[in-house]
Image (cartoon, rainbow, N blue to C red):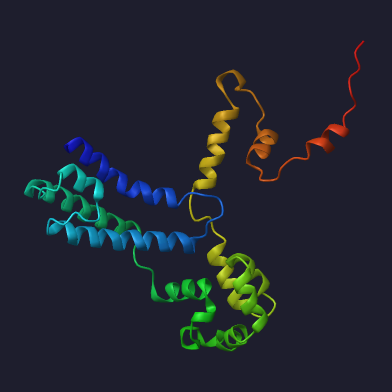
Amino acid sequence: MHLRLHTWLIYLPHKLNLKLQGSNHHVLAFHDSIDAFKAKLVLWHTQTCTGNTVSFPTLTELLEDKPAPGSLVATITEHLFDLKTEFGRYFPELPSEKKKMLNITRNPFQRTVEEIPEELQEEFIELVNNSALKDDFRSMSIDQFWLSARNLSPFIAEKAIKILMPFSSTYLCEVGFSSILHLKTEKRNRLDLESDLRCALSKTKPDLCKLAQRHQQQPSH
């Protein structure tokens, strides 16, 4: 019972980790996922303190509809409290100005001019009253939208792009290391990986027919 409980407690942040993987994510999506998980930790801790395990159906099944023992409740609540504290330390609340810029980047058409620094307010008004950009925001991804908005709103777009541009996780690095381990085995330890690694990590599909046409066939002798 305690071993299964320990495994279940470790599994809680694992589900969040899976959400943070992938090659086409930006910091806004990660910020939302982390904020949602931190809010869930508060909810779970509050519920578990009263012996309520409704948010944990697997645990409820383990208990076989019996009330959770006091020692079990204490173990779970202590773990959730420590996890909540650690997440608060590792992912602290953003400064208000930084948070405002995140919100503007996420959706400028839901923001007010009072949220914008004074030197950018006129540019912001031009942006939110442009019908073409409103249509672009509905049809484009968020990064494509801000690239298209650079001509009309260069300064706001630059700030938004700086938020979206940095790698929001080490996922791409981990994919690269995994590819290296797959390509450079013990028996191929002197292999020059540059070209092979580029092919392994590229999202472009090779035109095999065109590549084959460039090579002369080797006739039999």
Q: Name the quadrant containing residue 211.
A: top right
List the single residue furthest toward the front: 65
Q: Nearer the viewer, residue 183 or 139?
A: 139
Q: Please tell me whether residue 192 is drawn above or below residue 172 in the rendered image.
A: above
Vertical arrangement, residue 43 with respect to residue 4, above or below: below
Does residue 36 appear to the left or right of 49 in the view shown? right
To which quarter of the image does residue 213 belong? top right
- Residue with the most extreme left position: 70
Residue at coordinates 67% horizontally, 33% vertically from top-left? 196
- Specify whether 30 is left or right of 140: left
Q: Quarter of the image for the C terminus: give it.
A: top right
Depth check, front residue: 190 or 131: 131
User: Residue placed at 20% from the left, 50% from the top?
Assistant: 79
Residue 170 in percent (x, y) is at 49, 48
Name the residue at 30% across, 63% down: 39
Q: Is residue 120 above or below residue 190?
A: below
Judging depth in this view, the residue of 131 and 111 nearest the camera is 131
Q: Could you say where residue 147 lies in the image, as x and y percent from the top left?
A: 65, 69
In this orientation, which residue lies closer to the viewer: 141 or 67?
67
Q: Quadrant of the N terminus?
A: top left
What residue appears at the point 64 percent right and 74 percent down from the top-left corner? 136
Residue 81 in the image, given as x and y percentages of width and height: 20, 56
